[in-house]
């Protein structure tokens, strides 16, 4: 059976889930630049009233408006699976792609250097030292940069995204922090573009770079495009991803500033975190651990587009949900959900450990 066939079969047989904390935790309050947990009003007031006050939420009226926004966000999350499916159907029925060929991953989209790196990673000689000599290590934080796409592909891909943006069709936004950008599964990129990119090209690398974070068992993902411009989102607040490993590929167009910054793993207390800034280079990808706290600085001109893939390993997350730090309480969803499964074989004790703080 071909690997693509095997993958399709596995996906059909495998049901992915969310953790129940999706409806209570990590709710982003844009006006106050903070993530909160909402169990009920009493808990919320007790935990956050003080800090919200110090950030300008001074009156009862302000607080009521925050509570309303939280309620709206929780309702949005509850309807997410169904609404995403509806959008997907509407798009598949009515959207006319500008560049239909970009929906199916081909080697010609990929930078020759990337193909060489992947060939090395798949070879008998593959090891960490060999891989590190072929990619750029950024500081000692296990962040790596390497060419991924050709310039030609980046331009075509952005044109496709712009064409979709111009259409009247409904658009699902990547998350509560990114107000612009596109969820790629709704456009039909998952099966023939993102999944093969993850399985055939990125996983051979992540197996070597992140064996302690499930890098060899990345079995689902959430993929989206983010867009920054002077009249839209300028930057992205500090956060960590709901992912074991993330790849962030710069697509263009032209922009100034907008660097990423990385602190430490999420377990390191905020006042002890040390930051490193990382530039985006068009066509190049950055690999980092999902739980590495990071954000994006404001751009000062132009437009910045990036393709982000949050890659998940059920083997790792089935034991600990990175968003609530507890054993996941599984809730059924459509599609990949947040990458939890019921039937994942437990990891061999000496091969997989949840990301260690390094
Ligand atoms: O803007 C970027 O390059 C980073 C985006 C990001 O970290 C995310 O969407 O999770
Ligand atoms: Fe991120």
Image (spheres, rainbow, N blue to C red):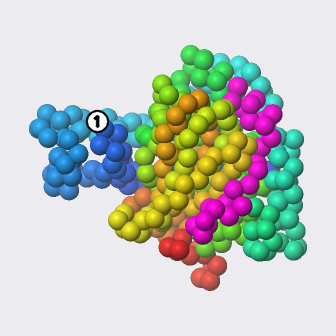
In percent of the image, x 76 and y 48: which residue is there? 148
- How many numbered marks have been drawn onto this rendered protein structure? 1
User: Where does residue 234 sit, x and y in percent of width and height?
Assistant: 48, 35
Q: Given the current orientation, which residue lies at the most extreme left position?
A: 60
Quadrant of res 205: bottom right
Q: Is residue 214 magenta?
A: no
**At numbered mark 1, what does the secondary structure look like: helix, strand or loop?**
helix
In percent of the image, x 54 and y 54: which residue is there? 277
Residue on which the image places disc 1: 69
In the depicted structure, whether residue 20 falls above or below residue 178: below
Quadrant of res 289: bottom right
Task: Report whether 269 appears left or right of 301.
Answer: left
Q: Which residues are magenta?
A: 136-159
Q: Observer-nearest residue: 157 or 38?
A: 157
Q: Is residue 224 visible?
A: yes
Q: Is residue 149 magenta?
A: yes
Q: Given the current orientation, which residue lies at the most extreme bottom position?
A: 350
Determine whether the beta carbon of the residue marked 1 sits less than 8 angstroms from the nearest atom of ligand 1. no
Q: Observer-nearest residue: 13 or 148?
A: 148
In the depicted structure, whether residue 159 falls above or below residue 73: above
Q: Observer-nearest residue: 118 or 132?
A: 132
User: Where does residue 91 sit, x and y in percent of width and height?
Assistant: 62, 24
In percent of the image, x 27 and y 50: which residue is there? 38
User: Where does residue 69 sit, x and y in percent of width and height?
Assistant: 28, 36
In percent of the image, x 62 and y 40: which residue is there? 306
- Quarter holding the N terminus? bottom right
In the depicted structure, whether residue 245 falls above or below residue 319: above
Task: Report whether 68 appears left or right of 194.
Answer: left
User: Where does residue 96 sit, x and y in percent of width and height?
Assistant: 71, 19
Q: Is residue 8 visible?
A: no
Quadrant of res 184: top right
Label 1 Cα neighbours within 10 Å, binned few <14 / some 14-19 / many ≥20? some
């Amino acid at each position: 059976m071909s690997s693509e066939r095997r993958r399709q079969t596995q996906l059909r047989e495998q049901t992915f889930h969310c953790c129940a904390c999706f409806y209570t935790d990590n709710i982003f309050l844009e006006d106050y630049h903070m993530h909160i947990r909402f169990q009920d009003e009493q808990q919320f007031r007790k935990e956050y009233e003080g800090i919200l006050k110090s950030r300008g939420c001074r009156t009862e009226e302000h607080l009521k408006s925050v509570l309303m926004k939280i309620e709206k966000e929780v309702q949005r999350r509850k309807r997410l699976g169904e609404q995403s499916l509806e959008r997907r159907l509407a798009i598949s029925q009515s959207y006319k792609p500008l560049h239909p060929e970009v929906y199916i991953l081909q080697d010609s989209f990929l930078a020759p250097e990337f193909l060489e790196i992947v060939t090395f990673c798949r070879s008998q000689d593959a090891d960490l030292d060999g891989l590190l000599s072929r990619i750029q290590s950024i500081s000692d934080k296990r962040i790596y940069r390497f060419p991924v796409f050709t310039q030609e592909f980046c331009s075509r891909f952005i044109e496709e995204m712009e064409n979709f943006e111009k259409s009247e069709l409904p658009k699902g936004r990547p998350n509560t922090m990114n107000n612009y950008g596109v969820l790629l599964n709704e456009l039909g990129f998952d099966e023939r573009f993102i999944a093969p990119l993850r399985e055939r090209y990125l996983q051979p690398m992540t197996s070597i770079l992140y064996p302690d974070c499930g890098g060899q068992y990345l079995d689902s993902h959430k993929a989206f495009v983010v867009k920054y411009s002077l009249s839209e989102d300028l930057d992205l607040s500090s956060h960590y991803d709901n992912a074991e490993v993330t790849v962030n590929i710069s697509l263009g167009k032209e922009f100034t500033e907008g660097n990423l910054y990385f602190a430490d793993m999420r377990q390191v207390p905020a006042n002890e975190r040390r930051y490193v800034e990382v530039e985006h280079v068009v066509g190049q990808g950055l690999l980092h651990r999902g739980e590495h706290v990071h954000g994006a600085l404001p751009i000062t001109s132009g437009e910045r587009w990036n393709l982000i893939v949050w890659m998940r390993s059920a083997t790792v997350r089935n034991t600990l949900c990175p968003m609530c730090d507890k054993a996941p309480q599984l809730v059924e969803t459509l599609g990949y959900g947040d990458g939890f499964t019921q039937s994942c074989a437990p990891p061999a004790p000496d091969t997989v450990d949840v990301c260690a703080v390094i």
